[in-house]
Image: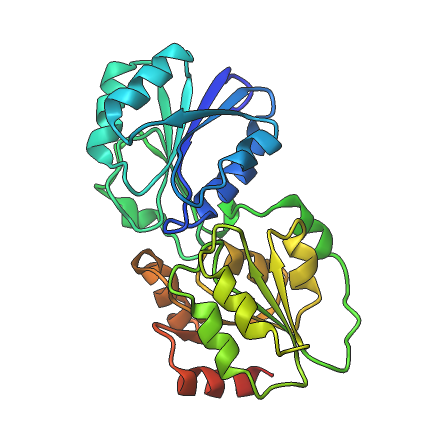
Amino acid sequence: MSNKIKNILIRADSSSKIGIGHIMRDLVLVKQYSNSNITFACQELDGNINSKAIESGYNLKILNSNDVEELDDLIKSLNIDFLIIDHYGIDEIFEKQLKIQNLKLKILSFDDTYEKHYCDILLNHNIYAQEKKYKDLVPDTCELRCGEKYILIREEFKYYEQLRRNKSKNKKILIAFGGSDFDNISLKVLKSLKKKKDIKIYLLTTKANKNIKSLKSYIKGFENIKLIINSKNVAKLIHKTDLAIVSPSTILHEIIYLNKEFIVIQTATNQKFMMKYLRNNKYACMKRFSKKSFLEKFEVKI
């Protein structure tokens, strides 16, 4: 299919509240369509990473809303053949309207939470995803792409997956709660580890995080904590750590891929299926942060 598509439009947003995961995984997916003209359609939300699309060599169109009419106009003006939707604010009704108004349009919809969709391809690339869960949720003709086989892994991770790491005397810990970390879970984790002066802590975030000021203020007195903003090589950072403390989001797939130990703390309701998978498989995970529970899990891992 990828060789026949001329014009592709990706509808996704990012912000301090939404996070940056949608855009980041879309950038991995579209590498499969290198012979197509690719455009991202995004709103200009607070804390967005829209510039990532341009930096990656793609076109960017700014939308004023999430209205179906505005997106339909853009599809027609760009003569779009293939629409990729990675947006929780777009549902089956929205998709169906686009299909009716653009009879030749093919739609690939991302899904993480077993919602109804009216699309040609349904992609749930999460490790827990099961095709059978989509019975009666998508058209009979829809192609289902579910589970570990379809996990979107950036190229740099494939390089580091092959490398052995030299073990160091002091343990290295990675803390990463998404590009925005809306509830500032990172700071709670840091405070719970303040007596662990013998470990090296890497705190990973992005400029979309509105809590950067409070994080910088807290770590001033700690020589063992390094704040990393907008890392250009997350794979290298994960590769050199012993334990990752993260949310059950895109980064968790990458950590599992590199065979790293981890503790997971849920940060959003749309992560409930991943959390169920982790609990069923006896992984260290928490529905909400608790200092006591976290330290118990930490001591076992370290």
| Horizontal arrangement in the rendering, residue 79 relative to residue 270 (left or right) | right
Q: Is residue 1 visible?
A: no
Which residue is drawn at the image coordinates 45% and 64% (left, top)? Answer: 247
Answer with the quarter of the image where residue 128 lies. Answer: bottom left
Q: Is residue 149 visible?
A: yes
Which residue is drawn at the image coordinates 28% and 45% (left, top)? Answer: 134
Q: Is residue 288 above or below residue 121?
A: below
Viewer-nearest residue: 18 or 116: 18
Q: Residue furthest right?
A: 166
Viewer-nearest residue: 209 or 294: 209
| Horizontal arrangement in the rendering, residue 116 relative to residue 53 (left or right) | left
Which residue is drawn at the image coordinates 76% and 60% (left, top)? Answer: 163
| Horizontal arrangement in the rendering, residue 135 relative to residue 78 (left or right) | left
Viewer-nearest residue: 282 or 59: 59
Viewer-nearest residue: 8 or 54: 54
**Quarter in which the C terminus is drawn:** bottom right
Q: Position of residue 186 (x, y in %)?
A: 48, 69
Q: Position of residue 110 (x, y in %)?
A: 38, 40
| Horizontal arrangement in the rendering, residue 23 relative to residue 243 (left or right) | left
Answer with the quarter of the image where residue 31 lies. Answer: top right
Q: Is residue 197 above or below residue 12?
A: below
Coloured how? rainbow
Q: Position of residue 169 (x, y in %)?
A: 77, 82
Query: How many numbered marks does the figure carry?
Result: 0
Which residue is drawn at the image coordinates 29% and 49% (left, top)? Answer: 114
Q: Position of residue 293 (x, y in %)?
A: 41, 85
Q: Is residue 192 above or below residue 247?
A: below
